[in-house]
Amino acid sequence: MRTLVIGNKAYSSWSLRPWLMLKHGGLPFDEVRIPLYRPDSAAPLAHWSPSGKVPVLHDDGLVIWESLAILEYLAETYPDACGWPRDRAARAFARAASAEMASSFSALRYSMPFNCRARRRVTLGDDAQRDVARVAALWSECRSRFGRGGEWLFGTFSPADAMYAPVALRFVTYGIALDGAASAYVASIAAHPAVQEWIAAGRTEVEVIDSNEVGTPA
């Protein structure tokens, strides 16, 4: 029995990451959605998650409660469906890029909160612009060095793509213009059938988290 507990699809970028990996890998799972930042959120979060946060994966009695840890578990358990790149150099690069996503880009996150059902515009400060430039350069390097065999960062879809998918959707939401390989990568993420499914579900949600509704409508 495999269950993934997630937050609002409109707003929870961390929930999207393992959900997308499971969907892309074709692994069946039950989904529990807990709307976040509500007075009644704490009790179900405490029931499912030792950290009181989402996402959290329950798999045959094992509980994993952090996005990158879930992706590592899926890659190790299901290497053909959810694995890292097979080439050692590509795998090391993919892990480093994914760890950078988990620990960095705070200005980008703050200036462009995840809001995949919206189209908005914001003015980016210098730090956020540097984050955008770093992400675009990293994507271009991944594609040029390791991704020539397909449309994803390392050719075939991997946990690195799951980690960066929410960033690509942020660029769509806020109309961030990119060039070349980075622009093509955003288009590939946005066209992924599972990503389209996630966004469509987010549009049906009635909850509104004001802190994620920044900027002006586009």
Image: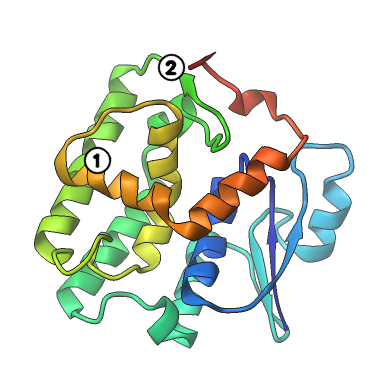
Side (left or right) of 30 relative to 11: right
Q: Which residue position is annotated with label 2?
A: 122
Dot in front, 1 or 2 = 1
Between 49 and 138, the one lying in front of the other is 138
Q: Which residue of the protein is positioned furthest toward the left in this rendering?
A: 145
Residue 158, image x and y in percent? 35, 69
Residue located 37% across and 38% down the image: 105
Between 32 and 94, the one lying in front of the other is 32
Report how far apart the C-alphas of labels 1 and 2 lie in the structure: 19 Å
Query: Quick check: can you spot residue 142?
Result: yes
Residue 141, image x and y in percent? 14, 53
Q: Is residue 42 above or below residue 134?
A: below
Q: Quadrant of residue 58?
A: bottom right
Q: Give the quadrant of the N terminus.
A: bottom right
Residue 113, image x and y in percent? 52, 31
Residue located 34% across and 26% down the image: 128
Residue 54, image x and y in percent? 66, 55
Give the mark nearer the N terminus: 1 vs 2. Answer: 2
Q: What amino acid is labelled 2 in the image?
A: Val
- Rendered image: mark on residue 111: none
- Rendered image: mark on residue 183: 1
Q: Count of labels shown?
A: 2
Q: Are marks 1 and 2 in contact (CB under 8 Å)?
A: no
Residue located 46% across and 31% down the image: 173
Q: Label 2 crowding class (10 Å Cα cut-off): few <14, some 14-19, many 20+?
A: some
Q: What amino acid is labelled 1 in the image?
A: Ser
Element carrying mark 2: loop
Q: Label 1 crowding class (10 Å Cα cut-off): few <14, some 14-19, many 20+?
A: some
Side (left or right) of 200 relative to 33: left
